[in-house]
Amino acid sequence: MYWHCVRKARLLASLLIKSFVVTVLGVASAPAEMNSDFERYSVNPHAPLAWQHTAEIDQYHWVLVGGFFNETVRKEYFSENAKVLSEIGATKVSRIFPSSFHSASFNAKRLNNQLMELYHQGGRRPIVLIGHSKGGLESMACVLEFPELISKNIVAEVVLIQAPLGGNKLTDSQGILRRLLIRTVLSPTAYSSLQTDDIQKIVTDKVNKLASTLRQRLSQHIHYVLSSKPANQMGRALKAAARLSTTMTVPYDGLVTRQDMWLSGFGEILGDMKNVDHLEFVLAPGSLVADNSSRNNVRGFTKSLVANLFKSKRPGNTEFKTLTQKIETTAVSAAVCRAVL
């Protein structure tokens, strides 16, 4: 009986260590894998996905959330990405365009209502929520404000592409960019919601205040796509923004720094795309503000994103659930041992 209990204790310890690795360090596919898949699919954009991925795609309602200034490029924004999703098997694909003139907090609350409507309209299929830039910030703020979206499996996964989640050094500037945007386009409220202080209130602070169990649960469904590109290689519109941010000394994509596109210890980095600016993977080729975009790259990016999302979730969810069950069973056995001894 004694040695049986010792073995149980050792098993429990090993399971707890492994659980830490799975939940904290992650077991998902490395960002490099998405990069290699992107290279493969962009060279051959009509290459099929693995059969197990195509079988899963139509189980979800794919919802794409546009970012800042979407009003000016709404026709091109996520249009090619949505087309690719439909071609590879998704029958429910929707695009949402939050107002650039409202704060991220206001749009996050409205997004919750829109997601609930789409969930019921889509036959209660779980939603894969893909937000870009300010749309990614609002998607994150939404699931943090309404975590039941994830706990009730209304939103299955959240993919945040180039979103300013840790802050926004560009809009923190008090110079010409601020005066230009506020006086010509935005309200002070909308602009301030893109600054680091306001972003931390609706994202970072809320993540830090989550109960550990809820934080762990939400973290398993959050995925980040990062990118960066030298300023002299960006498209025309982003080169102009780069001139307004000459003090930027860290890798960024023209609008958001790479380090601000993810939150350490919460979620996983799905992809870390090199030499990619803020617009070229979400705007259809031919757009005036994404003049360096190519159809093959947009298609390759979309396919690699879908493939790696499924790859990352299969081992993560399955192993975590299995480990949890084993730990509970072993912990009960260990408690019985202690009582007997």
Image: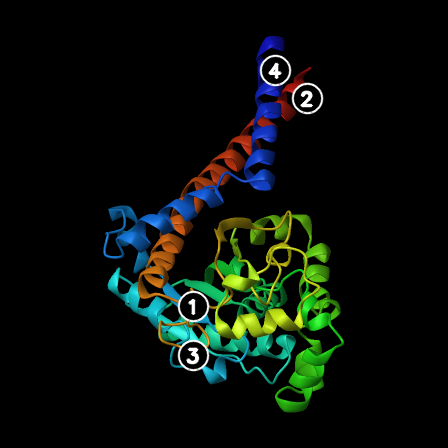
The numbered mark, 4 or 3, whose residue comes first in the sequence reads 4
Query: Split into 4 quadrants, where in the image is the C terminus?
Result: top right
* Dot 3 amino acid type: Leu
Residue at screen point 70% across, 83% down: 189
Look at label 1 and name its amino acid: Val
Q: For the residues marked 1 and 2, what is the alpha-carbon distance in whole angstroms?
A: 60 Å
Q: Which disc number belongs to residue 67?
A: none
Q: Which mark is residue 339?
A: 2
Bin the neighbour count of mark 2 within 10 Å (Cα to Cα): few under 14, some 14-19, many 20 and up: few
How far apart marks 1 and 4 lie (CA) works out to 56 Å
Mark 1 sits on what residue?
282
Locate the N terminus and report the quarter of the image it occupies.
top right
Q: Is residue 124 above or below residue 56?
A: below
Between 175 and 209, the one lying in front of the other is 175
Q: CA distance from mark 2 to mark 3?
A: 72 Å
Mark closer to the chain start, 1 or 3 = 1
| Residue type at numbered disc 4 | Cys
Instruction: Tell me the amino acid under the disc marked 2.
Output: Ala
Contact? badges 4 and 3 (CB < 8 Å): no
Residue indicated by mark 4 = 5
How many badges with numbers are in the image? 4
Front disc: 1 or 2: 1
Q: Is residue 75 above or below residue 246?
A: below
Q: CA distance from mark 1 to mark 3?
A: 13 Å
Q: Secondary structure at mark 1?
A: loop
Element marked by disc 4:
helix
Q: Nearer the viewer, mark 2 or mark 4?
A: 4
Q: Which residue is disc 3 drawn over?
A: 288
